[in-house]
Image (cartoon, rainbow, N blue to C red):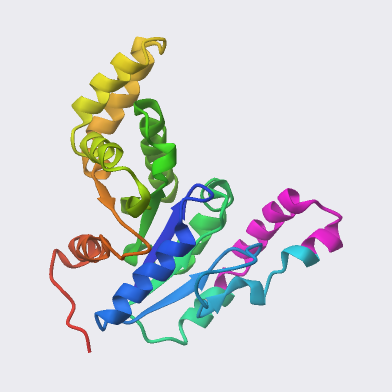
Amino acid sequence: MIFVYVVGTAGSGKSSLTRAFREWCLRNRYDAITVNLDPGVVNLPYTPDVDVREWISLEEVMEDYGLGPHGAQVVCADMLALNAVEVEERIGEFRTEYVLMDTPGQLELFVFRSTGKVMVEQLDPRQSLLAFVIDPALATTPTNFVSQLMLSAITQFRMGIPLLNLLSKIDIVEREALDMMLTWGKKPERLYQDVMVKSPTLHYQFSQGLLTIIKEMEAHTSLLPVSNETLEGMEDLYTSIQHIFMGGEDLEPE
């Protein structure tokens, strides 16, 4: 059983990716289930097999603690960590190959608090990976692209498990912009040049330090372009997961 934690900034397309990858898996006869870890979500593009809202209600937390929606989200995140055992038990009721964990919309609630680490440790960290979804709208300039890669690197540093970077919504991105982002992902030196040319006001040493880190983490900077609508790139995502856990050996669907 492989746990895929779908993470990223709000609006990057995490829930849509969860739906799309499960759909691709089922089309190709690979069993997969979906787990919603966001107690505050109202609408989902899929019906979760395991839903944390069975145990935690954002509205009830707001009422019981007299909190606004943002404060209640923080409390719910901590409550999610406390309910990790219940989530594990419910997942254990399924016989599946992939467990797609759709994390809260606010990245910081899952990554920068204890929630994500507790959940990963409660399940199986040896069979877990992060799918970091990058919204192309937040990565169209060199500095914005660097910011997304740094956020991705910090996420992996915090969680301590393998990570794949996914560039979402490629079906609605202009071809020229998409090609540039993919080039930055494959060639850190080109990204470095564009940062220095297009952002001359940045301190040289600061920019150089950031890009040095990205170069050293080159395996992470390569992007997997995906579309949640056309399912383009889902096979590449599946193949990348196989390389991480099976050394490239494919699983034979039952």
Is 71 contained in the magenta span?
A: yes
Q: Quadrant of residue 238?
A: bottom left
Residue 74 picture location, percent across and down: 68, 52
Q: Quadrant of residue 148?
A: top left
**Above-or-below relation of 104 to 186:** below
The answer, for residue 121, to whether it is visible in the render is no
Compared across the picture, whether 121 is left or right of 82 comes to left
Is 56 contained in the magenta span?
A: no
Q: Residue at x 28, y 80 (%)?
A: 27
Quadrant the N terminus occupies: bottom left
Residue 110 picture location, percent across and down: 54, 53
Residue 4 picture location, percent across and down: 38, 64
The residue lying toward the viewer, choosing from 71 and 231, is 231
The answer, for residue 82, to whether it is visible in the render is yes
Overall secondary structure of the magenta stretch?
helix
Residue 64 picture location, percent across and down: 85, 63
Q: Residue at x 56, y 54 (%)?
A: 105
Quadrant the C terminus occupies: bottom left
Q: Residue at x 69, y 69 (%)?
A: 56
**Above-or-below relation of 65 to 93:** above
The residue lying toward the viewer, choosing from 170 and 143, is 170
**Above-or-below relation of 86 to 157:** below
Which residue is situated farthest in the bottom direction here? 254
Compared across the picture, whether 235 is left or right of 164 comes to left
What number of labels is visible? 0
Bounds of the magenta span?
61-85
